[in-house]
Image (cartoon, rainbow, N blue to C red):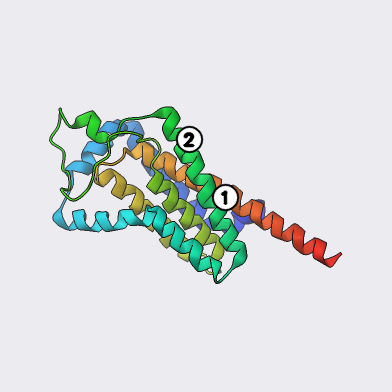
Amino acid sequence: MEQLLKSNKVFFGFYTFLVVIALIFLALYGKEGTFLWVNQHNKPLLDKLFFCLTYLGDGVSFVILILVFLFTNKQWFYTSLLSLAATTIVAQLIKLVVHEYRPYMHFHDKVHLHLLSWVNVHQSNSFPSGHTVTAFSMALILSCFVNNKRWSMLFVLLAALAGYSRVYLSQHFLSDVSTGSFIGVTVTLMCVYAVKMYYGTSAIKSLQ
């Protein structure tokens, strides 16, 4: 595990930096205050941009990644498949237990929200953000897979933008997104480690 963390220090360093920033905003303004700030700072161009970026955290994107690995790298196929299953189960179980209302239910009768007419705004099961779980899970998998670890910063940034899009589109609070990123990273890290250990053990046995 230590070697896995060291080899991906760029990913974890940049990720930790972004999490600290998110936690500072949450500590200063709370989940309601940060949501309203994001919601009020909107532009037509940003509407289209974040509507597209939110699909980076869609399950379909993860399935496409899994299919790519199916035909290119069996170890990472199993890693990504296990990660998708594990992160989905964890996120959905937490949603069912917490059952937190979405931002719309908090503010629709109090504040005029900027909503996109073509986006179906959900009302319940806000915590954690499933899209953010998926986005950061894929980001870590790709960061571990590539040899040039400089790409890790791009993967983290894209995942963070996918998370931000969930707040911008009034689907989640920043606290939902922050927790979702943590679930995506930690659960996926355990999956990557587990599969690596399995393949390492299998390789040793084959030599005996």
Q: Residue at x 24, y 58 (%)?
A: 49
Q: Are marks 1 and 2 in contact (CB under 8 Å)?
A: no
Element assignment for label 2: helix
Q: Amino acid at mark 1?
A: Leu
Q: Is residue 134 above or below residue 199?
A: above
The quarter of the picture where residue 155 lies is bottom left
Q: Can residue 73 be seen here?
A: yes
Give coordinates of residue 140: x percent, y percent: 50, 56
Q: Amino acid at mark 2?
A: Leu
Q: Camera-side residue: 35 or 99?
A: 99
The quarter of the picture where residue 96 lies is top left
Residue occupied by mark 1? 189
Residue 93 got which mark? 2
Crowding at mark 2 (Cα within 10 Å: few <14, some 14-19, many 20+): few
Give coordinates of residue 3: x percent, y percent: 66, 56
Q: Is residue 197 above or below residue 146?
A: above
Q: Camera-side residue: 92 or 17?
A: 92
Give coordinates of residue 81: x percent, y percent: 54, 55
Q: Residue at x 31, y 33 (%)?
A: 124
Q: Is residue 23 left or right of residue 79?
A: left
Give the residue furthest to the left.
Answer: 112
Q: Earlier in the sequence, mark 1 or mark 2?
A: 2
**Separation of marks 1 and 2 at Cα, in angstroms:** 19 Å
Q: Is residue 8 above or below residue 25?
A: below
Q: Residue at x 12, y 35 (%)?
A: 112
